[in-house]
Amino acid sequence: MKLSLYNLRKGFRYLKNYGLKEFFIRLKEKGEPEQISYAEYAAGHKVTEAQLKIQTKESDKWSYRPLISCVYMGENREDALAMLEQQSYTNWNLTCINKLCTGKEIELSGEYVALIEAGDTIEPDALYELAHAIAFPKETKQSGIHWEEIGKPDLIYTDEDVRCPDESKTTETAEPLLKPDFSPDYLENYCYIRHLCCIRKTVFLQALKENDGNPAIEELICRAAKQSDSIIHIPKVLYHTKAEHAPRVEHASMAAGSHEKKQPLVSILIPNKDEKASLEKCITSIRQGSYRNYEIIIIENNSKSEEIFDYYKELQMQYPDIRVVEWKPEIPGTFNYSAINNYGASYAKGEYLLFLNNDIEIITKDYMERMLTLCGKENTGAVGAKLYYPDDTIQHAGIVIGIGGHARGIAANMCVGQVRSDSGYMYRASLRQNLSAATAAFLMVPAKVFREVDGFCEALSVAFNDVDLCLKIRKKGYLIIYEPSVEAYHYESKSRGQEDTEEKVRRFQEEIEYMRTHWIDILKQGDPYYHPGLTRYRTDYSLGQK
């Protein structure tokens, strides 16, 4: 950050508004480097010879030393042996095969199977890390916090990098794939857990049998993952793959199939204050969709203009599926997003609730069908959409917990400012996946789940109420899904105004403290869907300092 008169004045204003503590946090954020190189990152994570010797000595004394059968998919046994003989963990054996078919030709005496493709390599501590996760699953640190108990794993996977020859030099370039913890919806379109993958033998053989002679490693791994009760991610680059073996996207992210034919009733909840033009655009986009079984509940709060009340009357006369309910705050003129939506939800008759800001313009015609298909799955707790600014840059591609910026380390929308067509790091902007949270500006939640978690927390009147809602849903064991094939423009809180008064700044500070108090575990340990090696100061999934 350059020192200038402008920056000094800006810093003093920030200090005055937010206080000394937040000033230093922001100063640290500004002082962070734009991005570190992968060479720098890799150098900081390289295991030393001394550490390898300690690993061998330690693992030789374990009371339980799982035997790992390394299946090398290539005929060059000498190369495979040379690589494996460097491993710090010694309880392994090797089988070389041409391809994966029925499994009859594969000799497996180990309890677990580690898959290695011909020409790829693994780090010398790779088998130690796998064995440690098997022998001590509760001690295994994943990318972030998981509330479910981790049992003895059926499947373990690690991070990897993709090696490509550099045409201008004699060396190689490498692209790191730093992965989230297990995300079943992400896996449906992108076999991101491909390397290094280690599978319990019983699960591996069953998946191989069901693979019906298909030699594709992606299909086998996906089948094994679906059959696994416990999956562990080791957030370390332990595998180096050739470009032709890198995970690839099988097809575009789309909600699979259509929802049940009966078409359940959806209650669309839209808070509104004045802003006729925005609301009109929002409702027009709803009605242009292909789904018909819905009700629209407009939650009127603090409007002043006669124009908006005339528009309400016009809407209700024209459309019998639109109702207007009036929320009255205890203190006249105050705004509480959580209380407003909870009030509106109390009038909802639908099996599903669709929370929608009045400044949303929906682009996807079959948005409702897509969201219902996902929201109707047994373990789904909420489905969020992909949102754009009017200039076709990304405003929301899911939310990660613990990112800095304006929220000072609580949470942030991802891929902000990237162009609409940008698929993002590891396709994170463009593929359906599980995340810890999504914005309530466009969020579908089963009504029973919303009631189960007692709705929005009214102590969070403006900020983080959607993050808190999603974390409560996650803690109950449900998944949050980000579905990028459901798209909309978001014109960003036109009716609420900016955080530009002393009262609003103080309220924001209180909401930050609420989140820190109630969600300290995930804030300290990290978001499970965000790798610890990625930045905490930007939203572009670039490398961090760790």
Image (spheres, grey):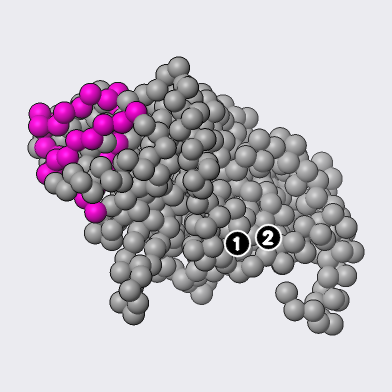
Q: Residue at x 49, y 34 (%)?
A: 55
* Part of the protein shown in magenta: 91-119
Q: Secondary structure at mark 2?
A: helix
Distance (Cα) linking label 2 and label 1: 7 Å
Residue at label 2?
A: 405
Badge 1 amino acid: Arg
Residues 39 and 253: in front is: 39
| Label 2, residues with CA under 10 Å away: few <14, some 14-19, many ≥20 | some
Residues 506 and 543: in front is: 543
Q: Is residue 373 left or right of residue 478?
A: left
Q: Residue at x 87, y 64 (%)?
A: 15
User: Magenta includes 106?
Assistant: yes
The label on residue 538 is 1
Residue 176 x/y as whole percent: 43, 58
| Label 1, residues with CA under 10 Å away: few <14, some 14-19, many ≥20 | many
Residue 104 x/y as whole percent: 10, 29
Q: Is residue 384 left or right of residue 153?
A: right
Residue 534 x/y as whole percent: 55, 55
Badge 2 amino acid: Gly
Q: How many marks?
A: 2
Tag 1 or tag 2, which sits nearer the N-term?
Answer: 2
Q: Residue at x 22, y 42 (%)?
A: 72
Residues 546 and 214: in front is: 546
In this view, which residue lies farthest toward the top?
A: 63
Q: Is residue 513 left or right of residue 248?
A: right
Rendered image quadrant of residue 26: bottom right
Q: Residue at x 56, y 65 (%)?
A: 36
Report whether residue 533 is seen: yes
Residues 144 and 235: in front is: 235
Marks 2/1 in contact by CB < 8 Å: the verdict is: yes
